[in-house]
Amino acid sequence: MNIDAHAQEYKPAAAFQFVPVADLKYRAPEYIIGELIETDTLGLMFGDPGCGKSFLAVDIALSVATGTPFHGRDTRQGSVFFIAGEGHNGLARRFAAWSQARGVPLHGVPLFKSERAAQFLDGASAKAVADAVAGLTAQHGSPALIIIDTLARNFGAGDENNTSDMSEFVVAVDDLKARFPGCSVLIVHHSGHAEKQRARGAMALKGALDCEYRVEKEGHAMKLVNTKMKDAEPPQDVYFSFKQVDLDGIAKSAVLEATEAPERQHKLTPAQRLAQETYVTAAAQNGVWDDGGFRGVHVDKWRDAFYSRHTGDSADAKRKAFQRVRRDLVDAQFMTATDDVYLIRDAGLHMAIMMQRDMRDTAGQNEKCPGAEAGKSGTCGTNA
C-alpha cells in the first residue's frame, strides 16, 4: 500500500468553509410549534418573575416531546431536554399537572430534565451538557428542542450585563445547538429591572436571536407577545388562562388554557396595586393552605407586608391607608373575608402566589445545599 499516495488523497474537513451561492437551497419555514418556533433556531422568552413563563416552558416542552398540538398549533414531535436551574420541585408538579389535564401519560416520553443547573461560561460544564444530551440520542433520537430555564441560573461566573460575557454565553449555546442539526434552543429569561419591555442584560443577546417573546399579565390572562421574528411572519399575540389541577389530593399545580384577550378593566389605584402586591407576598410567605390548596392570608400578615412598603410618614397614616384599601377591595368583590382571613378571587394571582411559594421553597433548599444553586455538587446528596 502506498502510504504517501493515500495521504495525498485524504483531505480532512476544514473547520471553516465557503460554498458557492448557487449551491444554497432555500426552503419554506419548518416549525416545531406552528407559527411560533422554527426548527434549528435560537429563541428567547422573557418576563417578570411570577408571570407564568416557566408554566409556558413546561407546556412547550411536553407538547413537543409528546407530539401534542400546542393550543391548536401543530408540533413536530421529538426529544426535548430541559436544563433547569431553579424550581425543581415545582417543575415536577407542573409536569404531572400537564399530563393529568391533557390525558397524556408521561411514561416513555422523551423529555429529560437536568438534575442541576449548567454553567455555560465554563467550557467544561458546557461540554458536559452537550455530552449528556448526546448520550441519550442513540436511544431517543437527536433533540428537537433544548430549553434553558433560566439564563441567569445557567449563565455561570460572569455578568449578563457585560457584552463580552453575554457574547460568550451565546457562542456556547450556539455550539450546543450546532452539535445537533435541526435542534432549536429556547432560553427562558427575566425582563429588565427598569425596562420591562426588553430582556435583562446586554443587547448582544437579542442580536443573536431568531425569535423572541415577552410574557406578561393582562387582566386575568397571560399574554405571549412576539418581539422579534427574524425570517418569518410575526405571529399574533396569544392569550392563556390558568386552570388549577389537583394532584391526587397531595398537591396542586396548574396548566395553561388558550383564551381570548381579556376585556379592558379599570386600572388599580397606586394604593390598590400596593395592597395587591403585598397580599401576594404575604400569602406566599405566610398564607393559609389546606390540602395543598390556597385558602387566603390572615389580615395581620397582610398588614405587616403592606406597612413595610407603604411610604406614609406615620403609623396612623399607614393604618388608615390599609383600612381604606382593604375595604375598597372587599366592596368591589375583589376578595372575600372570613374570620380575618382574606381570599383574593383572581385566579391569576392564585397562580402568582403558588409560583412565589415554589421559588421560596427552592431558595430554602439551595441555602441548605449551597452547591445546588451554582450547579455544583453539594453535600446534600442531590442537587434539587
Image (cartoon, rainbow, N blue to C red):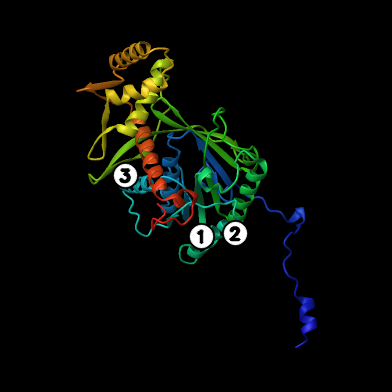
Do the CB atoms of the residues marked 1 and 2 lie less than 8 Å apart? yes
One can see residue 78 in this view: no
CA distance separating discs 3 and 2 = 35 Å
Mark on residue 133?
1
Between disc 3 and disc 2, the foreground one is 2
Count the marks: 3
Which residue is tagged 2? 179
One can see residue 309 in this view: yes
Q: Where is residue 191 shown, x and y percent of the image?
A: 53, 34
Please tell me whether mark 3 sits on a helix, a strand or a loop: helix
Which residue is tagged 3? 101
Type of residue at label 1?
Answer: Val
Apparent side of residue 225 relative to residue 345 in the rendered image (left or right): right
Q: Earlier in the sequence, mark 3 or mark 2?
A: 3
CA distance separating discs 3 and 1 = 28 Å
Looking at the image, which is closer to me, 97 or 199?
A: 199
Q: Where is residue 96 shown, x and y percent of the image?
A: 33, 48
Apparent side of residue 346 relative to residue 226 in the rendered image (left or right): left
Q: Earlier in the sequence, mark 3 or mark 1?
A: 3
Please tell me whether mark 1 sits on a helix, a strand or a loop: helix
Q: Is residue 282 above or below residue 134?
A: above
